[in-house]
Image: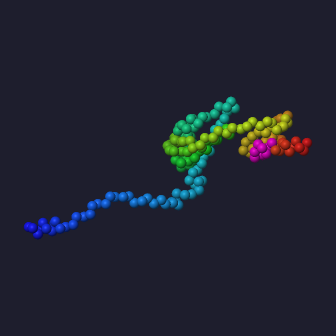
Amino acid sequence: MSQPDKAVAETPKPPPAAASVPPARRLRFDRNRFGLAEHVDPTQVYRVPVEPDGTTLTLEELLQPEFWADAVKGTKAGAMTAGTSIRVIWDDCSRVVTLLVKRVGNNWADVGVVSDATVTYIPRPPAHEKFRVMWGGPVDQFRIINIADGRVWRAGFASEADAHRAIGEQERKL
């Protein structure tokens, strides 16, 4: 009987278990997660109408999930998903807001504000008593109107400054 006891006593004990240390995390660049922004973030644009009396939508109304119900239903499948950017521009160019879609349902979209910029313009004195410059839409762009008869004198200027420059050149010729 003493023989088996001796064998048990002489068996070496296993070393104590080492504390489990998680392996160091190796940061790697994943090429599959890198690409053109147009492929990853399809930016949508929404133009906010501004009434002649100045009434318009507020930012609080734009942040309501129900506001985007028609946009979610009306877009192509997958066009408005989480991560989509929406650039909101007021028609009078007084404000530009960038929204990010956080979650989308069948008839709602949860959005958050990324940036909000209010644009103020310094009023410019009229360039001339005979002409005025006004926005004519995406086709005519900025156009010069003869105040006397209301007819368009020239159109298609890319900026208001270009139209005023044309009026100045016309004054020098006269």
| Residue ID at (84%, 37%) | 128
Q: Pinpoint residue 66: horizontal percent, then vertical percent.
A: 53, 37
Q: Pinpoint residue 154: horizontal percent, then vertical percent.
A: 82, 43
Magenta includes 162? Answer: yes
| Residue ID at (63%, 33%) | 56
| Quarter of the figure with residue 112 | top right
Looking at the image, residue 101 lies above or below residue 54: below
| Numbered range of the magenta stretch | 156-164
Q: Pinpoint residue 164: horizontal percent, then vertical percent.
A: 80, 42
Res 159 visible: yes
Q: Pinpoint residue 68: horizontal percent, then vertical percent.
A: 55, 40
| Quarter of the figure with residue 124 | top right
Image position of 57 (left or right of 156): left
Image quadrant holding the N terminus, namely: bottom left
Image position of 158 (left or right of 101): right
| Residue ID at (49%, 60%) | 28
Looking at the image, residue 136 lies above or below residue 53: below
